[in-house]
Amino acid sequence: MVEKLLQIYKYSKFFYRQINNYNKIKAKKENLLILDKYLKKIKEYAEKIEFNELKNLLFSFLKEEEENLKKLILEEKENFGKELKEELEKNNLSLSGIFPTLRVGLFTLEINFDLNTCQIFYGPKIEKLKGKLPLSPTLIVKTLKGYYDYLAQPFSLKEYFEKLLKAYERLLAFQKLNFGEKVFLIDLLSELIFLLQKKEFYLDPRKENFKEYSRIKFSYDLYRLKTSFGNTCDNYRFKLWVAPFDATLDRKKSIWVPNNIETGEGTYFSFISFEKL
């Protein structure tokens, strides 16, 4: 009898502590993942209890709280989605998709409510830009605006076309190819980066003088070029060659270029070539 009473006391003390902690976290409404872990732990130990009255009481509590937690999770998702949409609309951006994958123009958001984080990708999960951004609508939109500003930096389309052509000609010489033959876009990017440097870099090629030029900037600038100039400038025309499926899986053999920055649609290209008109 004493042993059973002692066992009941130990179980009661354990469950009191677990349920008390659970209620404290629940009141804060900060991390629903922790609530779920508490319920699972309580359920795990409740299943081992031999005392029916205590067991029934615990499972009644678990059933009610599991239903409440489902409602809280749904409410959290709805509130987050509503706040994110409102914040985006303030910045003339639109939201589409369903959790966990959302689209905002050129970008994809991967939402993880369990970890309370957001991943940001360029295009349809092409290039990961942010790994673990907190689920704050204001912070997410601020980050997206920063990427849009970075991509849309003003530049001379004509000057860029000329440097693209020069990079192509340099690459042809290195690879001993004839004008008009196609080359990998990623190989061209290496040459283009060198041509885009400021004179300070050529005079003193140190890290602080180097101008970064990323894959996503290259992708977006190609989009701007082909939609503004129609691929043609000064009696030259370039052509982008669509990547075969296997090449779309290899970053060295293809690059994704948007077709529509509002919907985020785009195409994988592997090669580029120029022709003289």
Image (tube, helix red, strand yellow):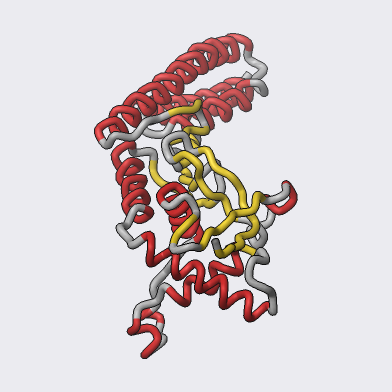
- Please name whichever residue, 42 or 53, is drawn nearer the observer in this view of the structure: 42
* Residue drawn at x 54%, y 10% as measured from the top left: 60
| Residue drawn at the location 46% of the way across and 34% of the way down | 263
Query: Which residue is located at x 48 percent, y 44 percent?
Result: 119
Quick check: 181 left or right of 122? right
Please name the residue shown 55% across and 44% down the image.
Answer: 125
Q: Is residue 63 above or below residue 269?
A: above
Q: Position of residue 101 (x, y in %)?
A: 52, 33
- In the image, taking residue 57 as reference, residue 81 lies left or right, namely left
Work out which residue is located at the far bottom of the displayed protein and give it: 203
Is residue 123 visible to the viewer in this orientation of the structure? yes
Give the quadrant of the N terminus: top right
Residue 15, above or below 218 = above
**Quadrant where the image shows the C terminus:** bottom right
**Which one is nearer the viewer's eye here, 33 or 161?**
161
User: Who is closer to the viewer here, 118 or 175?
Assistant: 175
Residue 130 visible in the shown view: no
Q: Is residue 172 left or right of residue 224?
A: right
Query: Is residue 208 positioned above or below 34 on the image?
Result: below
Percent x, y for residue 124? Answer: 54, 41
